[in-house]
Image (spheres, rainbow, N blue to C red):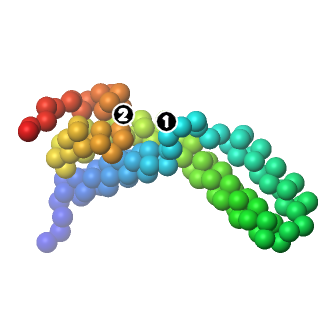
Amino acid sequence: MPMSDEHKAALAQGRRESRAIKGYLVALGRRRPGRPVTSESLERKLRGLDAKIASESDPLKRVDLVQQRLETEAALASMADSANLGELEEGFVAVAKSYSERKGISYSAWREIGVSADVLRRAGIAQTRRRS
């Protein structure tokens, strides 16, 4: 039995909304508390590590420095991927209410995983009272 056009459209909408929600939540999960790390600070760290690696004669210290450089390069690449947090946030705001209603996700659940109250307000998700 073939799917109706309405069913196909609903499935496509669900996929679009899921991608937007997941993208934003993944980016939120990458943020760390404390002072934000910038691409400039990571690039500065890389230059310092390169200089230390070039001058280090102890092979054990050198391998540790090489590992630090690899981790810093990965962090820099990851930062480029998550640099569009504002864009991901806007995508979340656009679909979060519909997604929440369809999936039965409460304001409290979103807050618990780190979505800010401001973002939820902009998405039109109202704060609900918790039941004891």
Q: Position of residue 59 (x, y in %)?
A: 83, 72
How many residues crowd around disc 2 within 10 Å: few (fewer than 14), some, or many (20 or more)?
few
Q: Give the image quarter of residue 73.
A: bottom right
Q: Which mark is residue 63?
A: none
Q: Is residue 33 left or right of residue 58?
A: left
Seen from the viewer's position, the closer of residues 121 and 58 is 58
Seen from the viewer's position, the closer of residues 26 and 8 is 26
22 above or below 53? above
What residue is shown at x 49% (from left), y 35% (from top)? 86
Q: Where is mark 1, residue-wise?
A: 86
Q: Position of residue 34 (x, y in %)?
A: 54, 37
Disc nearer the start of the sequence (1/2): 1
Q: Is residue 98 among what the camera can see?
A: no
> SS class of the residue under badge 2?
loop
What residue is shown at x 57% (from left), y 42% (from top)? 83
Q: Amino acid at mark 1?
A: Gly
Q: Is residue 52 left or right of residue 66?
A: right
The label nearer to you, 1 versus 2, is 2
> SS class of the residue under badge 1?
helix
Q: Where is mark 2, residue-wise?
A: 116
Seen from the viewer's position, the closer of residues 69 and 97 is 69
What residue is shown at x 44% (from left), y 49% (from top)? 29
Q: Amino acid at mark 2?
A: Ser
